[in-house]
Image: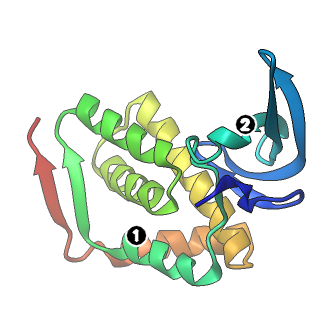
């Protein structure tokens, strides 16, 4: 997927930061080279990020999912398969890698795993923050994609999680 796919005004997803709006596409001289940058305004905290066009694929910049994809995310949340490392360091590393991909489906996996874990034990501070971030990323993107309010999406996410609980099969990877 070529990164020139984005134009001014597009809403995009920047991994680990959430939705941003491309405010501008401009050329700047960088170490003597002319480089094109996207000026991206991250909606969550209103910060500006400069992303080189050449690196847009590398950082995982992507378009927001489409409406039908919202159902696919819900399926992941409902699905009763869980992958949990007994060892929290291994789990944290795996989850961090998934979050970095920027894929909403990977983020949904992280959220589901951590949400279940949090029901049975207290999460570490870092995992609690990751759970909150994963939820924020899911809710904000699915609300835009599904043209629904964030509070409705939150309710749907919680319902999806509880509905899948009956036949939970826990895959515990022994680290």
The residue at the point 63 percent across, 77 percent down is: 66
Callouts 1 and 2 close, C-beta under 8 Å:
no
Task: Name the residue that disc number 2 marks.
Answer: 52
Of the image marks 1 and 2, the number of the one nearer the N terminus? 2
Instruction: Locate residue 79, reporting x and y percent.
Output: 31, 74
Looking at the image, residue 66 lies above or below residue 17: below
Task: Name the residue that disc number 1 marks.
Answer: 77
Residue placed most toward the observer, 77 or 70? 70
The residue at the point 81 percent across, 44 percent down is: 40
Circle 1 residues within 10 Å: few <14, some 14–19, many ≥20: many
Query: Could you give the CA–CA distance between mark 1 and mark 2, rounded to whole angstroms?
Result: 34 Å
Q: In the picture provided, is 122 more to the left or to the right than 137? A: left
Residue placed most toward the observer, 141 or 113? 141
Instruction: Locate residue 31, reporting x and y percent.
Output: 77, 15
Instruction: Locate residue 41, reporting x and y percent.
Output: 83, 44
Looking at the image, residue 124 lies above or below residue 1: above
Residue placed most toward the observer, 22 or 123? 22
Q: How is the image coloured?
A: rainbow
Q: Label 2: state its secondary structure.
A: strand
The residue at the point 28 percent across, 49 percent down is: 120
Q: Label 1: state its secondary structure.
A: helix
Circle 2 residues within 10 Å: few <14, some 14–19, many ≥20: many
* Residue 156 found in image quarter: bottom right
- In the rendered image, the residue lying farthest to the top is 31
């Amino acid at each position: 997927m070529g990164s020139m796919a984005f134009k001014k005004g597009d809403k995009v997803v920047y991994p680990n930061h959430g939705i941003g709006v491309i405010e501008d596409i401009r050329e700047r001289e960088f170490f003597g080279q002319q480089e094109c940058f996207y000026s991206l305004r991250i909606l969550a905290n209103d910060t500006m990020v400069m992303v080189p066009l050449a690196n847009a694929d590398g950082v995982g910049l992507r378009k927001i999912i489409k409406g039908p994809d919202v159902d696919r995310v819900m399926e992941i949340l409902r699905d009763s398969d869980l992958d949990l490392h007994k060892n929290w360091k291994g789990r944290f590393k795996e989850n961090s890698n998934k979050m970095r991909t920027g894929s909403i489906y990977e983020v949904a996996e992280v959220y589901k795993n951590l949400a279940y874990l949090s029901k049975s034990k207290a999460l570490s501070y870092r995992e609690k923050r990751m759970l909150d971030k994963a939820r924020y990323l899911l809710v904000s993107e699915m609300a835009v994609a599904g043209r629904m309010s964030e509070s409705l999406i939150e309710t749907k996410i919680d319902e999806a999680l509880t509905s899948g609980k009956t036949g939970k099969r826990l895959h515990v990877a022994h680290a």
